[in-house]
Amino acid sequence: MMELKRYGNQRFSLLFDPKWLPHCLHFLRQDLAKQYDRTALGILWVLISQTINISGIAFVFSMVFNTELKDFFPYLAISILSWGLISGVVGESPRLYHAAGQVLNAFPIPYGTFALRMVLRHFVIFAYGLPVFFAVALYFRVPVFPLVLLALPNLILLFLLLYPLANVLGVLGARYRDIAPIVGSFIYLLFLVSPVIYEASRLPANGKWLVILNPFYYLLELVRRPFLGQVPGLEIYLVVAVMIAVAWTLSTVFDRKYGRYIVFWV
């Protein structure tokens, strides 16, 4: 009780405290080490699995879409990596605080630490898969430089969205356990209706609403266009900015209204 009192309301905050960053990075290293514990190649399995997955899809769907492999392969590689980052965070978030229930009840760790740890883990996995894209881009001579440098600020924008979104979905998932399977069920559907393995330009006129109303489309474009040597359109940045504002507003409201109740829900 004395230890809880020492931390005060900080324990129940969904907003990350920088003082906990070293602990968060320590937990992150533990997560990555545990995931590939006792394997000969360790986290290099991320690179291997991404290579096999992307190569298989590229060869098959380049024939299905009757398109040149040199045009399709680089687009598919960065699309799959970007989708894995975004969908990984969204899909795991509803179970975020429920999975950490025992730790939350035993130690006065601020809630925001768990969200940051999870989001950073998916960014690290994304980074480990990037050599696959750059190898493909180099082989097919895709002119990615210098616009690929724009990927860094765009990824920061993506982080500024995914972190508060993880908190919002984490609180909802802790309170309503049905949120996790609902989100999980829709992830696969969203993969099919999002332009991941096909260009949005391939959709017929009566199917454009699939991308206009699809938030995943804007996030995919934000990440992948710089890697393809292109600048995302202004509408991409405007929509993402609105999404960031909404996510932070919801996260702040949830922090003030429901933060102290999470420990009882889990």
Image (cartoon, grey):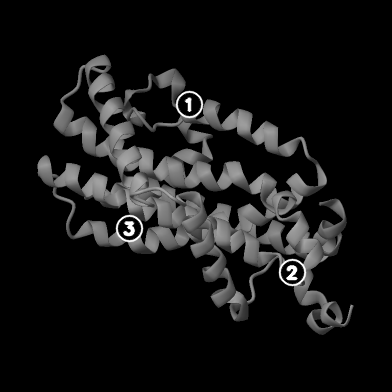
Q: CA gap, disc 2 to disc 1? A: 35 Å
Q: Is residue 9 above or below residue 134?
A: below
> Given this view, does label 2 or label 1 mark the residue nearer the observer?
2
- Of the numbered discs 3 and 1, the one sitting upstream in the chain is 3
Q: Is residue 231 visible?
A: no
Residue 121 coordinates in the image, percent (x, y): 49, 56
Residue at the image point whose x is 57% and y is 52% from the top: 243
Residue 264 coordinates in the image, percent (x, y): 88, 56
Residue 192 coordinates in the image, percent (x, y): 47, 25
Q: Is residue 258 above or below residue 141?
A: below
Depth order, front residue of 96/68: 96
* Element assignment for label 2: loop
Quadrant where the image shows the N terminus: bottom right
- Of the numbered discs 2 and 3, the one sitting upstream in the chain is 2
Q: CA gap, disc 3 to disc 1? A: 24 Å
Mark 2, other Cα within 10 Å: few <14 / some 14–19 / many ≥20: many
Q: Amino acid at mark 2?
A: Ser
Pointer 1: what residue?
Answer: 193
Q: Give left or right: position of 147 versus 9.
A: left
Q: Amino acid at mark 3?
A: Ala
* Element assignment for label 3: helix
Depth order, front residue of 209/230: 230
Pointer 3: what residue?
Answer: 151
Q: Give left or right: position of 223 versus 132.
A: right
* Element assignment for label 1: helix
The image quarter in which residue 11 lies: bottom right
Residue 251 coordinates in the image, percent (x, y): 69, 59
Q: Is residue 17 visible?
A: yes
Q: Amino acid at mark 1?
A: Val
Pointer 2: what residue?
Answer: 13
Residue at the image point whose x is 28% and y is 38% from the top: 51
